[in-house]
């Protein structure tokens, strides 16, 4: 039996076999045949050890990814390990010295295996009781150990990477030999400093410098450098935030070692040791919940996690996002995003007593780029007031929302289908007060008629004749049901599909007679993208949020394309734009204009279960939804009291319209306005579609006042090139063409009212001027007395 405190030869050998760091290695290399340890044939054991591992190039330290706005500013950061790689020349020299001093002072002198350090560690371990065993691994081996652990996918692989076995140490040595052969010493040190764990979720010296001291690694002073070098021994135990005393004591050990090596003076070490440990913490936010654009961020995240273009399996896509070191440049414009956020919260606050919610998406016509996306709440658990995990702005694949009925915003697709079939703007249809939609067939030819009478909503009207223009302006349900029947239900559905309309739950669009009234559940994103196609004169683009993705090595990753395509004729789109422009001036959304060419459509869903507004300019399109996440039919939008609307039902123009107006006005501030194109003349072959009116009597008005009246009627005018005398005062209107009382079409492009300006009344014939010397007397050929003058006139 061995004496207490003594170490016999047999006991030493047994203890040697159990040490994790170097004893196992030496036992494997010196005492046990390599073939047995590595599990390979004896003849091939040396070749195996010296051969380069096949997966060396695939092993990379996890990098944090960043989602960036269109201007390159940060939206959010994603990481499994908070790491920012930096080159060696951007790391403070004090850090390099401190780390080398405490971890591997002979790093530049030895190869993959530091024999002297290994023997020193072995002898130290043999002469203690088994506690506080020293390791002999140099920086290269530590780098390899970290690399293998961080690339482990399963728990079993992670356990294998840290298990106490000779086989693990030999595997690490094999990789270390390969690394030493491939890279110069400076590059190995750089890799180690960028992969090492410094505690408190900080991986790599740059992340650690920012976390503990709020500076870059290049700005670390000696005291800070020694603190970080000390943490490397055990990132969890010496966490400077959680264990300040332990971190300071370890810092002092590093400073003493640097002085012992002569890299700093004893006096300098003592001076630094006397200083307190001063931290200035900075927390790196991780994921979308901390972002200022959380729902747009979440949309981008889900695009990467769900789209096979970014990886065959979900696991691959998750690794790419959370560890791939990506720079994800998106389409989001902060000006537009902030305008949307501000408008949503102004009209529907996140924590409103009515528990209503609102969502908005803004898409650029002609590119499909999503410029803004928001839900007027915070991203978080639904049970917490003012929060939700559901992105009501997007489809289920990008936010778990199953969509919402879009109401009368769908009437635009029936209108477009009618124009696509050549129907003129002035075509009139009598819209009854109630209408049973019979005679309808879906795209498979199935009869989908309904004998239930449908009526007009409160924001529409019926019982008279409407044109395509006025029927749209007044959003008449029965008019559009009859128009859909004339156009064909299937053609209307096909038009919607051409413009990118999809159900939010991913299922096929349901085809029933009331399709035009918008019963299908869709997302604001799909409606905004469809309306953007009108703004782009019939060019539809799939909505995209990602413009470019760069890897940490500078290589680009393929991203989804907008696949822009001309899906309807430009003239058809121009006709739609012309009609829907009037919705903002003479229709259900009058008063919601932008002071620039714009068009749109209200959408009030049946039973007031939700309200929508979708509108656009040639530069930007937007769709707004307001409703109740708990269910619109059980919690209708009636008698609600919100900051800008209190009492009565909510229509498309009540809350969604003003949200749209506020957002668009701010987003387009400073953006040059362009107009819509005049529709082809063929669409006016039955007139403008406006209800005819009597020409007002403008005579006697100043031309400016007369022009104002005509503009208010939607009439064009011009001033005649010549003036004329009239009974009306000079400078006022003398006459009009058409004449007062004439029946006119105020929207007829071919009718221009001509205003002729008065020169005032015609002047009377002037009397001859009186003679200067008295009464006029004719010259006579003879001398006569006054009594001899002949009688001239009476």
Image (cartoon, rainbow, N blue to C red):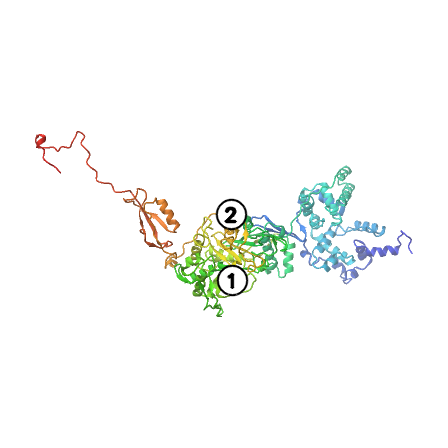
Q: Is residue 432 visible?
A: yes
Q: Is residue 8 left or right of residue 711?
A: right
Q: CA distance from mark 2 to mark 1?
A: 31 Å
The answer to which of 577 and 744 lies nearer the viewer is 744
Locate residue 684: give its quadrant: bottom left
Q: Position of residue 470 (x, y in %)?
A: 41, 57
Residue displayed at 55% across by 64% down: 507
Q: Are marks 2 and 1 in contact (CB under 8 Å)?
A: no
Tag in front: 2 or 1? 1
Q: Is residue 398 left or right of residue 755?
A: right
Lower position in the chain sequence, tag 2 or tag 1: 1
The answer to which of 173 and 14 lies nearer the viewer is 14
Image quadrant for the C terminus?
top left
Q: Residues within 10 Å of mark 1 (few under 14, many from 20)?
A: many
Q: Residues within 10 Å of mark 2 (few under 14, many from 20)?
A: some
Q: Is residue 26 left or right of residue 733?
A: right
Count of numbered marks: 2
Q: Is residue 65 visible?
A: no
Q: Note whether 778 is above or below 619 in the view shown.
A: above
- In the picture, the disc for residue 248 is none
Residue under label 1, please give it. 519
Q: Position of residue 638 (x, y in %)?
A: 53, 56
Residue displayed at 88% across by 55% down: 9
Describe the element under mark 1 as helix, strand or loop. Answer: loop
The answer to which of 584 and 669 lies nearer the viewer is 584
- In the picture, the disc for residue 666 is 2
Q: Position of residue 50 (x, y in %)?
A: 74, 57
Describe the element under mark 2 as helix, strand or loop. Answer: helix
Image quadrant for the N terminus?
bottom right
Q: Position of residue 463 (x, y in %)?
A: 41, 61
Name, please, the residue furthest toward the bottom. 446
């Amino acid at each position: 039996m061995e004496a207490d405190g003594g170490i016999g030869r047999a006991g030493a050998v047994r203890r040697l076999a159990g040490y994790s760091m170097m004893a196992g290695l030496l036992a494997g290399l010196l005492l046990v045949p390599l073939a047995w340890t590595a599990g390979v044939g004896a003849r091939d054991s040396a070749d195996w050890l010296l051969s380069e591992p096949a997966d060396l190039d695939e092993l990379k330290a996890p990098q944090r990814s960043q989602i960036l706005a269109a201007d390159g500013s940060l939206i959010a950061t994603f990481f499994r390990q908070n790491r920012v790689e930096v080159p060696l020349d951007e790391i403070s020299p004090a850090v390099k010295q401190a780390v080398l001093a405490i971890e591997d002072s002979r790093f530049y002198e030895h190869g993959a295996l530091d024999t002297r350090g290994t023997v020193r560690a072995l002898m130290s371990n043999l002469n203690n009781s088994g506690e506080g065993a020293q390791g002999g691994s140099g920086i290269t081996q530590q780098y390899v150990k970290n690399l293998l652990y961080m690339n482990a996918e399963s728990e079993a692989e992670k356990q294998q990477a840290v298990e106490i076995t000779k086989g693990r140490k030999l595997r690490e040595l094999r990789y270390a030999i390969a690394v030493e052969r491939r890279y110069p010493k400076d590059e190995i040190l750089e890799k180690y400093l960028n992969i090492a764990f410094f505690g408190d979720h900080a991986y790599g010296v740059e992340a650690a410098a920012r976390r503990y001291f709020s500076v870059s690694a290049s700005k670390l002073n000696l005291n800070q450098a020694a603190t970080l070098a000390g943490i490397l021994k055990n990132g969890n135990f010496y966490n400077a935030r959680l264990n300040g005393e332990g971190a300071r004591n370890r810092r002092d050990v590093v400073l003493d070692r640097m002085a012992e090596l002569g890299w700093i003076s004893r006096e300098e070490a003592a001076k630094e040791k006397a200083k307190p440990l001063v931290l200035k913490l900075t927390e790196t936010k991780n994921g979308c919940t901390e972002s200022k654009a959380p729902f747009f961020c979440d949309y981008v995240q889900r695009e990467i996690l769900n789209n096979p273009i970014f990886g065959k399996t979900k696991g691959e896509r998750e690794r790419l996002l959370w560890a791939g070191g990506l720079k994800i440049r998106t389409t989001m414009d902060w000006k537009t995003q902030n305008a949307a956020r501000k408008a949503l919260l102004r009209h529907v606050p996140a924590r409103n007593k009515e528990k209503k919610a609102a969502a908005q998406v803004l898409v650029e016509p002609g590119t499909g780029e999503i410029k803004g996306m928001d839900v007027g709440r915070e991203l978080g658990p639904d049970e917490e007031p003012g929060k939700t995990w559901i992105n009501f702005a997007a489809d289920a694949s990008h936010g778990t929302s199953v969509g919402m009925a879009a109401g009368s915003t769908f009437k635009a697709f029936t209108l477009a289908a009618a124009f696509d079939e050549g129907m003129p703007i002035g075509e009139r249809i009598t819209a009854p007060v109630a209408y049973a939609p019979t005679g309808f067939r879906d795209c498979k030819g199935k009869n989908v008629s309904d004998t239930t009478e449908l009526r007009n909503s409160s924001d529409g009207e019926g019982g008279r004749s409407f044109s395509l223009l006025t029927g749209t302006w007044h959003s008449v349900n029965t008019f559009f049901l009859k128009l859909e029947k004339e156009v064909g239900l299937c053609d209307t559905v096909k038009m919607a599909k051409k413009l990118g309309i999809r159900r939010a739950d991913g299922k096929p669009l349901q085809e029933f007679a009331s399709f035009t009234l918008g019963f299908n559940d869709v997302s604001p994103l799909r409606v905004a993208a469809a309306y953007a196609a009108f703004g782009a004169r019939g060019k539809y683009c799939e909505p995209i949020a990602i413009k470019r993705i760069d890897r940490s090595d500078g290589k680009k990753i393929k991203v989804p394309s907008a696949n822009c395509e001309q899906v309807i004729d430009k003239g058809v789109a121009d006709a739609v734009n012309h009609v829907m422009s009037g919705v903002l001036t003479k229709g259900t959304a009058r008063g919601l204009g932008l002071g620039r060419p714009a068009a749109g459509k209200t959408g009030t869903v049946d039973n007031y279960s939700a309200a929508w507004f979708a509108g656009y300019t040639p530069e930007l399109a937007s769709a707004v939804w307001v409703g109740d996440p708990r269910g619109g039919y059980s919690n209708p939008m009636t008698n609600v009291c919100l900051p800008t609307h209190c009492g009565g039902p909510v229509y498309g123009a009540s809350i969604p319209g003003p949200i749209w107006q506020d957002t668009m006005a701010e987003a387009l501030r400073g953006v040059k306005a362009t107009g819509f194109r005049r529709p082809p003349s063929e669409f006016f072959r039955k007139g403008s579609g406006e209800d005819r009116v009597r020409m007002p009597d403008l005579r006697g008005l100043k031309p400016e006042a007369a022009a104002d009246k005509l503009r208010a009627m939607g009439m064009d005018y011009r001033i005649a090139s010549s003036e004329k005398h009239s009974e009306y005062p000079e400078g006022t209107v003398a006459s009009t063409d058409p004449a007062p009382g004439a029946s006119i079409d105020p929207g007829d492009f071919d009718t221009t009212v001509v205003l002729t300006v008065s020169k005032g009344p015609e002047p009377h014939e002037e009397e001859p001027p009186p003679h200067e010397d008295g009464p006029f007397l004719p010259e006579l050929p003879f001398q006569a007395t006054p009594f001899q003058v002949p009688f001239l006139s009476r």
